[in-house]
Image: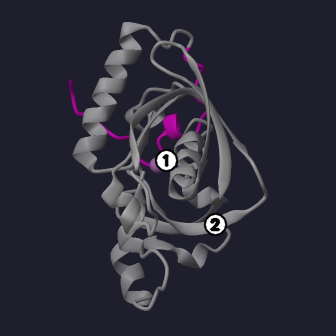
Amino acid sequence: MAILKIARMGHPVLGRRADEVVDPAAPAIRQLVADMAETLHDADGAGLAAPQVHVPLRLVLVGIPAERLAREGEDGDGEPLTPLINPIVTALSEDRTVGWEACLSLPGLAGYVPRFTHIHCRYQTLTGEVVEREADGFFARVLQHECDHLDGVLYPMRMDDMSRFGFVRELQQKRPEEPETTAQEAADD
Ligand code: NI
């Protein structure tokens, strides 16, 4: 296991379409997931995409502890740490929710990002099994954020109000009355 170096915005690996994982059961993929898990735990994030650790493959890792979900104002048990290989996200309706996001590739920054509220996700597991599931709320937000990384898309590119993009500390000073999720609690994905 190893903690991997995280690529920051501007690095070419974050701006390209990542390649399909040909063999999800390959030992190298299992090792990558193990290293990404250690990296994500170290960074205290909710998700990590392989391009963020300089590996241009279609693989993301997500995990949401129950207490994190509660901070986002949602009930539930959260989501166990799960690798999603070759994921495909499809919106189930046009409904969108706006919420604060952050990204390990844009340290110190946060933005208020619209995302689809209800999505379907199809992906492969580490054994190559195909899984289909639906997601909504914060989990759906994290999945969209992570899967965007596989297409070279960072969250500021999804924003429609750039006045709500900035450094977390300064955003807190600007909007101490923010009634919704605060920038401080933004998803560090
Ligand atoms: Ni990110």
Q: Amino acid at mark 2?
A: Thr
The x, y position of residue 182, in whole percent, is: 42, 76
Which quarter of the picture shows residue 123?
A: top right
Who is closer to the viewer here, 95 or 171? 95
Can residue 92 be found in the magenta stretch? Answer: no
> Residue at position x 52%, y 43% from top?
146
The x, y position of residue 188, in whole percent, is: 39, 56
* Snapshot colouring: one colour
Horizontally, residue 75 falls left or right of residue 160, namely: left
Q: Local crowd at mark 1 within 10 Å, few (<14), some, or many (≥20)?
A: few
Residue 180 at least partly seen: yes
Q: Which residue is mark 1?
A: 10
Q: Which residue is mark 2?
A: 97
Horizontally, residue 118 falls left or right of residue 67, namely: right
Query: Where's the N terminus, which quadrant?
Result: top left
Q: Viewer-nearest of labels 2 and 1? A: 2
> Residue at position x 61%, y 69% from top?
98
> Residue at position x 38%, y 65% from top?
70
Which span of residues is magenta-colored?
1-21
Q: Earlier in the sequence, mark 2 or mark 1?
A: 1
Q: Amino acid at mark 1?
A: Gly
Q: Local crowd at mark 2 within 10 Å, few (<14), some, or many (≥20)?
A: some
Distance of mark 2 from mark 1, alpha carbons? 27 Å
Can residue 4 be found in the magenta stretch? Answer: yes
Determine the secondary structure under disc 2. strand
Asked if marks 2 and 1 touch (Cβ < 8 Å), the reply is no
Residue 4 at least partly seen: no
The x, y position of residue 89, in whole percent, is: 66, 39
> Residue at position x 67%, y 41% from top?
120
